[in-house]
């Protein structure tokens, strides 16, 4: 059955399958690569600090991607639509400001992170700590909606900060004016160390049906394949699922293949490297290289190439290594795609 809650036309998958926000992983180059194989139903950016955007733009006057690294991180291409920018923060005025920036950049939606367990984020009163500050959480949603000028606002969260408080927490969001809640089925304290509790997502759906039937729910946690993503959504009754780590070494995830050979993996890695260098010149190339291991995991012959790739100092050196190992693609083509 097609979910009526999708605000962006006809969803690409039914149930929906979204690409999760992953800091330092789903950067503009990686997202573009994912979309080049088969796009997800919905794409999230990495999280971006609302305070940081406010500070760099309002206080320092840095208004272009050339002089503002956060605007560089917020680059996207048309093939990634519908694309949702994720913000984190705990100051409603700055959240309103950041939502306006995101809306002006042409994003399709704005998501507020209320699930991040990172200590630095928690210390700011943002991320998962908002689960224990429900009135501030509601203020942030209201502020984002004001700044968003009509764009749909959503929240991504967890079952709780220290303990599972889903029944107390979810109604705050359901009644706060969001169109979608994504639930990562663990508490923040659990990080990703215990299996995701999908039975609690089922409980979330029951609560949603009771309190706010028009709000969509995405379930998140431990999904390994496109088939599992759809099956899980159907058995649990959510509108869709969100997938993170399983996409990291597999940008073709949304195409649904089981096996992808050495050549295609090297090709993906080259295209990612060239895009990364072109789109994110402010980031050290070693950040792109962190992804290489995932691309070549478990592939026969992968270890030797990986060693050489990790010794490369730039995208063009990556191309040279790939050529030595039989890659026949065109750099000009790859570079063209990057721009
Ligand atoms: C490297 C990495 C970075 C992440 N960054 C973010 C982030 O910026 N915002 C967010 O809401 N969640 C972030 N997450 C959490 C994921 O979006 C997702 O909820 C989590 O990985 C569980 O889904 P999975 O089992 O499909 O990976 C991150 C996860 C990883 C592994």
Image (spheres, rainbow, N blue to C red):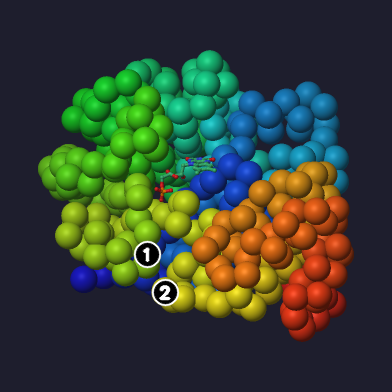
Is residue 325 depicted above or below 318 in this figure? below
Q: Quadrant of residue 241?
A: bottom left
Is residue 246 depicted above or below 176 in this figure? below
Dot 2 surroundings within 10 Å: few (below 14), some, or many (20 or more)? few
- Return the residue nearer the eye: 244 or 143: 244
Residues marked 1 and 2 touching at CB (< 8 Å): yes
Q: Quadrant of the C terminus?
A: bottom right
Q: Quadrant of the N terminus?
A: bottom left
Residue 86 at x, y percent in the picture:
54, 42
- Return the residue nearer the eye: 152 or 137: 137
186 lies left or right of 49: left
92 lies left or right of 285: left
Q: Is residue 292 visible?
A: yes
Identify the residue at horizontal 27%, vertical 22% (top origin): 163
Residue 105 at x, y percent in the picture:
67, 51
Sequence-earlier tag: 1 or 2: 1
Q: Looking at the rendered structure, which numbered label has been put on residue 56?
A: none
Dot 1 surroundings within 10 Å: few (below 14), some, or many (20 or more)? some
- Return the residue nearer the eye: 262 or 319: 262
Q: Looking at the rendered structure, which numbered label has been put on residue 258?
A: 2
Residue 114 at x, y percent in the picture:
43, 32
Q: Nearer the viewer, mark 1 or mark 2?
A: 2
Identify the residue at horizontal 49%, vertical 59% (top origin): 247
Q: Is residue 204 visible?
A: no
Is residue 135 depicted above or below 266 in this figure? above
Check disc 2 and report its element: helix, strand or loop: loop
Q: How far apart are labels 1 and 2 at the CA level? A: 8 Å
Q: Quadrant of residue 274?
A: bottom right
Check disc 1 and report its element: helix, strand or loop: loop
Circle 1 is placed at which residue position?
225
64 lies left or right of 248: right
């Amino acid at each position: 059955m097609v979910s009526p809650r999708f605000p962006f036309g006809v969803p690409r998958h039914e149930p929906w399958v979204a690409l999760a926000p992953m800091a330092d992983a789903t950067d503009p180059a990686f997202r573009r690569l994912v979309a080049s194989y088969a796009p997800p139903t919905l794409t999230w950016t990495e999280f971006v600090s609302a305070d940081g955007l406010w500070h760099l733009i309002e206080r320092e006057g840095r208004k272009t991607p050339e002089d503002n690294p956060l605007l560089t991180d917020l680059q996207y291409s048309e093939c990634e639509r519908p694309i949702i920018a994720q913000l984190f923060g705990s100051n409603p005025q700055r959240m309103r400001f950041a939502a306006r920036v995101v809306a002006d950049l042409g994003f399709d939606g704005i998501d507020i992170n209320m699930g991040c367990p990172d200590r630095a984020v928690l210390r700011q009163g943002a991320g998962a700590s908002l689960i224990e500050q429900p009135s501030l959480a509601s203020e942030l949603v209201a502020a984002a909606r004001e700044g968003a000028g009509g764009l749909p606002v959503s929240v991504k969260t967890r079952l709780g900060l220290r303990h599972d408080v889903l029944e107390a927490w979810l109604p705050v969001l359901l009644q706060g004016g969001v169109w979608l809640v994504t639930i990562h089925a663990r508490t923040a304290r659990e990080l990703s160390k215990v299996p995701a509790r999908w039975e609690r997502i089922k409980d979330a759906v029951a609560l949603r049906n009771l309190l706010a039937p028009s709000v969509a729910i995405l379930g998140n946690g431990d999904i390994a394949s496109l088939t599992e993503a759809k099956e899980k959504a159907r058995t649990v009754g959510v509108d869709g699922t969100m997938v993170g780590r399983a996409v990291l070494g597999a940008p073709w995830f949304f195409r649904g293949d089981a096996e992808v050979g050495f050549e295609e993996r090297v090709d993906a890695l080259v295209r990612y490297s060239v895009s990364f260098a072109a789109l994110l010149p402010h980031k050290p190339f070693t950040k792109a290289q962190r992804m290489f291991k995932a691309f070549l995991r478990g592939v026969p012959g992968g270890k030797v190439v990986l060693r050489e790739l990790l010794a490369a100092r730039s995208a063009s050196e990556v191309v040279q290594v790939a050529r030595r190992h039989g890659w026949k693609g065109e750099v000009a083509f790859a570079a063209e795609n990057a721009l």
